[in-house]
Each structure stands twice: as structure tokens, then as C-alpha cells.
Amino acid sequence: MSTLHPFSETAELLTIRDWLRFAVSAFTENKLSFGHGSDSAYDEAAYLILHTLHLPLDTLEPFLDSRLLSLEKQALVELFKQRVEKKIPAAYLTNEAWLGELRFYVDERVIVPRSFIAELLHQSLFPWIESADNVNNVLDMCTGSGCLAILSAHVFPNASVDAVDLSSDALTVAERNVKDYTMQSRVQLIESNLFAKLGDKKYDVIISNPPYVDAKSVAALPAEYLHEPELALGSGSDGLDATREILKQAAQHLTPNGILIVEIGHNRDVLEATYPELPFNWLDVAAGDEFVFLLYREDLLG
């Protein structure tokens, strides 16, 4: 922490407005990296303050001039110190991450949820799936915290969802989230190296947000990302090791009209060059049409 914003002098901060200004300045001065739920110093400071004070996360304005108790100030100091000095992502400090209106428990055993696939699921994958009621079996490959599996169970009311991950630690976190949403009867957690333990099971929809960061990018990641499980980030020199295996095996686990949806980060050019024969459908998400692809079973067979 620089001398400009020393935590030892925060006693002079009285109101939430004071603490918000202080946090934004400290986060900016210390060049924190965002992308684990917030995309700016202001948004993250507001979130951490509201969460710590047990206030509604979407309601800041009415409380800005409220004065803080000494215990509340102490809690904020400890939180901000960990964020600034240790570069711990906000989601790990609060043990929560949000996908739309759904809240999930997270800690450093899982990657912080931030998949573009969540956007597509909120739209029930329309128009690629005409009726959510007709989806009976869904696979979430590399499930991590289980968030996309749980979201799939919400979106497809008649579906049984298998949530697969290689990490037993991640599945422990996913189990907690499944229980929080009382989805035990609909979401099955499976420890497996991709498709290895799925036998001949077939699915109408396979979704996956696998590791996809290439080796060069892994080496340049900001400190915040180094708190996340290494297993969940890097995937070989070009970032496509996991995706290659998924493309190789997905067809035998899809129903005749089944679809595969995979998020691949910034690897579109490399992927298309590697598989020039595959007719990738690139789906529109908030960040553009370069991050998530869709293929039909017959595309993979061809």
C-alpha cells in the first residue's frame, strides 16, 4: 500500500461515501486487475462495501451519507487490505459469485464463474433449442463450482444434468451449491477426466467452459488470476488441449439432434485453423461473436 492511501489513517473516513472514495482511489493507485465479477474499481468498491455492511447489492445511493460503526470500519479495512496487498479476487473475499440473479458459493478451490454460456442459457439457447421442455439430458463438462449445471437445471425444467470435473475439490464446492438450490435429484456430480467415466451416456445438450488459456497468456496473467486453480486456466501451449479432446469425443455422447456448446476465450482463429472442416456456429454474447461456438452432432461426425 502506498503512502497516499494508508490504512492506518482510515479513522478519518466517516461515511460510506468516504469509504467508497477511499477504496476507488486505493484500488486504482495499486493497479488492481478486475474481471472476477466487476470490471472497474468503482463497481468493485461499491460491491465490497455493500456486501460487508449487509446492504442490498443494487442499492447504494440511499446509504452514501450513513456513518459507520467502528466494527464496520474494521471489517472494511481488513477486506481492502487483502484485496490490495494480496490481490485476492473479490469473489474469494466474499465467498460469492453471481450469474444473473443466481448466487453461488465460491472459494479458491474453483475458478470464479464468469462464463458467457450463462448469457445463452438465460435465453434457453434460443433459437438453437426451440423448446426448453424437450431437453431431457444435459452435460456440463468442466463444471467447477457447478454454476452452469445448476443454471441448466433451472432453464430446462425436465432435464437431468450431469456435472463433470476432474477436481474433487471443485466438486466439493459444486456439491454445496447443488444443495443450496436443492437440486440433488436433478444434478449429478461426477469426478472424471472429461468423458472417461461417462460410459455410453448421451445428451441433448453438452455445454463446456473448459480451461482455454494458452501458455503465453498464463505466464502473463495478473496476480489476481494466480489465486485461481491452475488446472482450471491453462490448457497446453495453444490453450486448446481440453477443447481438442471434447471435439474428439463429444459426438458419441450426443443424441441424434444434440448440440455441443463450448467457450474458448480468444482462441477462435487458432481453432478454425486447426479444424477447417468444422462448420463452427459462433454465438453472439455481450463481448462479441468470437468466444463461444456451437456444433451439431452431425457436424462432428462429418
Image (cartoon, helix red, strand yellow):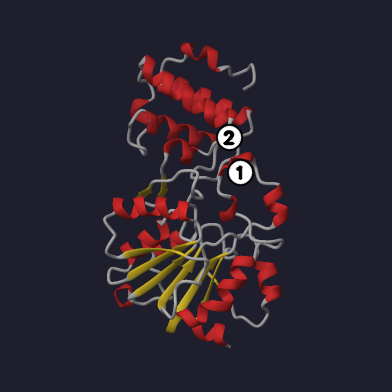
Dot label at residue 87: 2
| Towards the viewer: 125 or 60 | 125
* Residue 181 x/y as whole percent: 29, 54
The mark total stands at 2
Q: Is residue 284 left or right of residue 54?
A: right
Q: Is residue 101 visible?
A: no
Query: Badge 2: how crowded within 10 Å, few (<14), some, or many (20+)?
Result: many
Give the residue at mark 1: 226
Residue 67 higher or lower than 252, as above or below: above
| Towards the viewer: 159 or 155 | 159
Asked whether the beta carbons under mark 1 and mark 2 sit within 8 Å of each other, the answer is: yes
Q: Is residue 301 left or right of residue 97?
A: right
Q: Earlier in the sequence, mark 1 or mark 2?
A: 2
Amino acid on which disc 2 is placed: Lys
Q: Is residue 87 visible?
A: yes
Q: Which quadrant, please, contains the C terminus?
A: bottom right
Q: Secondary structure at mark 2?
A: loop
Q: Is residue 219 left or right of residue 113?
A: right
Q: Secondary structure at mark 1?
A: helix
Amino acid on which disc 1 is placed: Leu
Residue 53 higher or lower than 150, as above or below: above
* Residue 46 x/y as whole percent: 45, 33
Residue 143 higher or lower than 81, as above or below: below
Query: Badge 1: how crowded within 10 Å, few (<14), some, or many (20+)?
Result: some
Question: Which residue sits at x=46%, y=77%?
Answer: 259
Measure the C-alpha gap from mark 1 to mark 2: 9 Å
Question: Which residue sits at x=59%, y=28%?
Answer: 85
Dot label at residue 82: none
Question: Which residue sits at x=47%, y=40%?
Answer: 92
* Residue 224 x/y as whole percent: 59, 40
